[in-house]
Image (cartoon, rainbow, N blue to C red):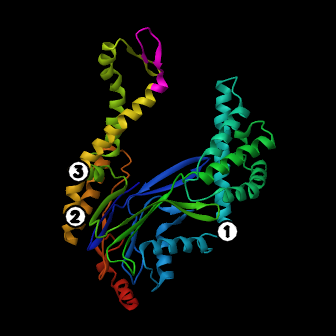
Amino acid sequence: MTSEICVMNRMSVVLAADSASTISYYDNGKLQQRYFKGANKVFQLSNAHPVGLMIYGNAEIMGVPWELVIKAFRKHLDNSSFDSVEGYAKAFQQFLNDSQQFFPKESRDESFKNSIKIETAICCNDFNNRAADDAEFDEGHQLATLEELLANLEFKNGLDQEFLERLLHEWPNDILEELKNDENGHFHQHFADRTDAQLRKIIELAITLKAKKLHESPTGLVFAGFGDSSVYPEMYVAKNTGFLERELIMADIEKELISHGMDSYISGFAQSSMADTFIIGFDEQAFGTIQGVQRQALPDVLDPFVTKLGGSIERTERGAVLKDGEGNVLFDEQSFSDVTTEALRPVGNKILGESRQNHGEPLERVISMLPVEEMAELAETMVDLQSLKEKVTRPSETVGGPVDVAIITKNEGLIWKKRKHFFDISLNQRYLQRLHTKD
């Protein structure tokens, strides 16, 4: 994990990030993760133009460090530019899609097949366990139910039914054959006595799920700076980026543009509880706790009023029911829960609105007037606070290490206010000479 901040006003963008990174991989069908604290997450995307890129989430894509890919794109970009920050993001996506050097077709295919094999093994193992616990478990019925659910699931990553149909036409047979011919036997233990038709159905459902949902270990990309036509800073965020089969998917897009009507912006990415608390007064977890307490307490709050009207509210193991004076159930547990959700929604919106008015709007007004150096100090402090919180509350310390801070302005481009190095600059004068030679 990581903690990152983007702050913008009409003069500049500030990007700040910690140095913790997550490496994800599969070992015997199980997702494993390792954490390190020396990663670079803020990058100058162009040597000639004022635009930067900040990454969060997974530090690699198909086993290739993002840092290598980003620096290769910077060299590929050379002096080219675009009218908007979104233009740089689209060019970056196209570069990765076209790159056979970093992502050969064979590697993309192998990565996709392995992910489907793992999903298939997980599904079969789950069915095996359920069948062992329940003699009446009907796998065929369960598959039919899953098929119906997936058919109604919307695409969440910009793909479409035509793309899915191509995957279902090209891949199930090959994947099935590889599973059957697995010499190591890692997957056979999960398949029990299923027929080829049963396994193929599970493979097809795994492919459908992959094509419709977002990635399990995605990378978030935050592009920020100025395009050629930009008067004020812009930000383009793809919160969910990764390869699906041979396509690089950039999904869950968010765009923010400073304009005459919007003079400041501040947001945290990945681990952002301290930033959220600073910006709106509480974080997502605290807000969820508030909502949970409200839902739990509502039957007790309503009970005196309902009793006065001759009815009653009774708690059950599944929730609460509302009865009239004759004991007839007016609202069962599900109906009571649904009504509670609808009734409390305006309350939640009111809390968010009041908090934003009392915390967020004053902060945004101040940010709109901050000099660039004070914006940088604000961003760095918020990352430091998140790092401190993680250090004292989590054994893995998924946020930490030195904080890198970059400032981007229209005329000066990307300027480093703080930047770590894995070497001592004073001992590497030839490195500085090489940089000057390139300039």
Tell me whether the residue at label 3 lies in contact with that at label 1, contact meaning CB atoms closer than 8 angstroms: no
Which residue is disc 1 drawn over? Answer: 105
Q: Which mark is first along the chain, 1 or 2?
A: 1
Task: Determine the secondary structure under disc 1.
Answer: helix
Could you say where residue 138 lies in the image, as x and y percent from the top left? 71, 29
Front label number (2 vs 3): 3
**Mark 3 to mark 1: distance in Å?**
51 Å
Percent x, y for residue 408?
Answer: 31, 75
In this rendering, which labeled residue sits more in front, label 3 or label 1?
A: 3
User: Which quadrant of the rendered structure holds the C terminus?
Assistant: bottom left
Q: Report the front residue among 333 and 33.
A: 333
Residue neighbourhood size for the residue with mark 1, other residues' Cα within 10 Å, grouped as few (<14), some (14–19), many (≥20)? some
Q: Quadrant of residue 50?
A: bottom left
- Name the mark on residue 155: none
Residue 81: name its quadrant.
bottom left
Vertical order, 135 against 280 (above or below): above
- The residue furthest top is 326
Judging by the rendered image, the residue that carries numbered circle 3 is: 357
Magenta stretch encompasses residue 326: yes
- The amino acid marked with disc number 3 is Gln
Q: CA distance from mark 2 to mark 3?
A: 15 Å
Residue 7 is one of the magenta-drawn residues: no
Q: Amino acid at mark 1?
A: Lys
Q: Which residues are magenta?
A: 322-335
**How far apart, in angstroms, are the residues tagged by discs 2 and 1?**
46 Å
Determine whether 271 is above or below 76 in the image.
Answer: above
Q: Is residue 217 above or below residue 231?
A: above
Q: Earlier in the sequence, mark 3 or mark 1?
A: 1
Q: Position of residue 126 (x, y in %)?
A: 63, 36
Q: Earlier in the sequence, mark 2 or mark 3?
A: 3
Q: Nearer the viewer, residue 387 or 148?
A: 148
Q: Which residue is mark 2?
A: 367
